[in-house]
Amino acid sequence: MKLFRKTRQSAWCGWRTYSLGLLSLLGTAVPAWAEETATLDSGDTAWMITATALVLFMTLPGLALFYGGLVRTKNVLSVLGQCLAMAGVMTLLWIIYGYSYAATEGNAIIGDASKLFLKDLRVDSLSGTIPESVFLTFQMTFAIITPALIVGAFAERMKFSAMLIFMIIWFTFSYVPIWHMAWGGGLFAGWGVLDFAGGTVVHINAGVAALVVCVMIGSRTGYPTEPMRPHSLVLTVVGAGMLWVGWFGFNAGSELAADGTAGMALLVTQVSTATAVVVWMLIEWLRHGKPSILGMATAAVAGLVAITPASGTAGPMGAILIGAASAFLCYLAATTIKRSFGYDDSLDVFGVHGVGGIVGAILTGLCAAEFMGGAGLDEAMSVAAQITEQVKSVIVTIIWSGVVSVIAYFVANALTGGARISEEGEQQGLDLTDHDESGYIA
């Protein structure tokens, strides 16, 4: 049956092409059926369904395991549960109002209410060459993983209820507007900012929120004098591997088509990540005499983060630069800078996602240039001008997310009688205090 459909489709396409050519030669007007219209592309659709599954796979189980292995035994379930909760809550928020206010025209800051509750969505609704249902589900997986990233910054000390309130407010007033500014035809789009898969929308946005919350909630009891080692680097490395694989859907899927740009996005994602792993490994080898597995896993995520905004415009050489720069600067942020300022970013969310996102967003302006092997800049945009626009978008994202995060934390803190668990509860662990369960049975 499939073969028959393909044969019939090929015959129809061949006859139509022949007819158009003949009509053109005869000077006859081209009929209405020959006009360019949006049509479903089965290849693009199949790829985007796959990419959507890959991005969801990044959160569950990828990020959950990556974070779960990094915390102490008594908190492993709490981190897994927070990631699982984000998959549920953000799905509903995206459907009810998130997609509408992100993806509709609106103004420079926010969309409008025309697609609340997915109004007018039908089986045959298209977004380019793919079903709109696939497009909005793909973007839903981004809305899931972005707040899930933040939980690593305040791991082991924030109430589950406070986390939920904070995330709902932050999603509504930070994630959705920044999405619209970058991808919905808003402020950043008007500036000509290049953000292919979420440098500002996802990583800087989440990284800044992570820094704000970990500072406001305070350090874990005993930090930094008491050792707080990861309880299972095995889980962390497995999670990192899942993130690496899933990220191909994240970056290559952002082309929304199965074409050459998607293929190049896949290649540069691999190159940047591999470069970051090697550079971080060499830094640790030189400084400490041996490389750490935790360092290499962290480096992989840093390389993935940094290439994200450039994945649709950079070439392989640009990917090497971005991967190397992200490894070096994220290493400094997660070690030297964090120790110097004394904040307890438990799982280095700001150090990796915030700093990596900033590095990638700015270097996108350079690596997109043809002399760097990139796809090329707009004719009216020089490298200096493009970098300027990239920096502007970074600054706006930092300020916007920072302000929203402060307000969201104050609200969450007030509504829950204190966002932080008690010292006794922290000693017991969030698995017991928040969920009355244990990740491991002695």
Image: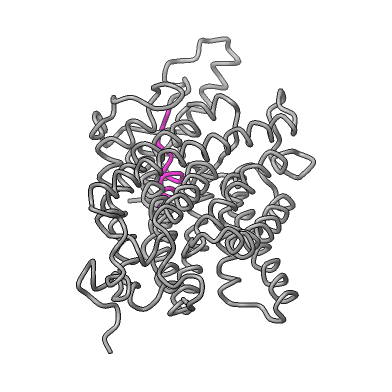
Vertically, is 49 above or below 37? Answer: below
Q: Is residue 31 visible?
A: yes
Q: Nearer the viewer, residue 337 or 64?
A: 337
Q: Is residue 225 above or below residue 82?
A: below
**Residue at image x 56%, y 58%?**
352
Q: Position of residue 291 (x, y in %)?
A: 66, 78
Give x and y (percent) for residue 404: 40, 39
Residue situated furthest right in the rendering: 371
Compared across the picture, whether 253 is left or right of 59 comes to: right
Check the image and tell me how it is coloured. one colour
Q: In which quarter of the view is residue 136 placed?
A: top left
Instruction: Identify the main secondary structure in magenta.
Output: helix
Left or right, residue 402 beside residue 377:
left
Nearest the viewer among 190 and 290 is 290
Region in magenta? 38-49
Q: Nearer the viewer, residue 387 or 406?
A: 406
In the displayed structure, would residue 103 be above or below residue 56?
above
Work out which quarter of the rendered image holds the C terminus and state it. Answer: bottom left
Q: Nearer the viewer, residue 50 or 282?
A: 282
Residue drawn at the location 29% of the way across and 69% of the way down: 430
Is 334 in the magenta?
no
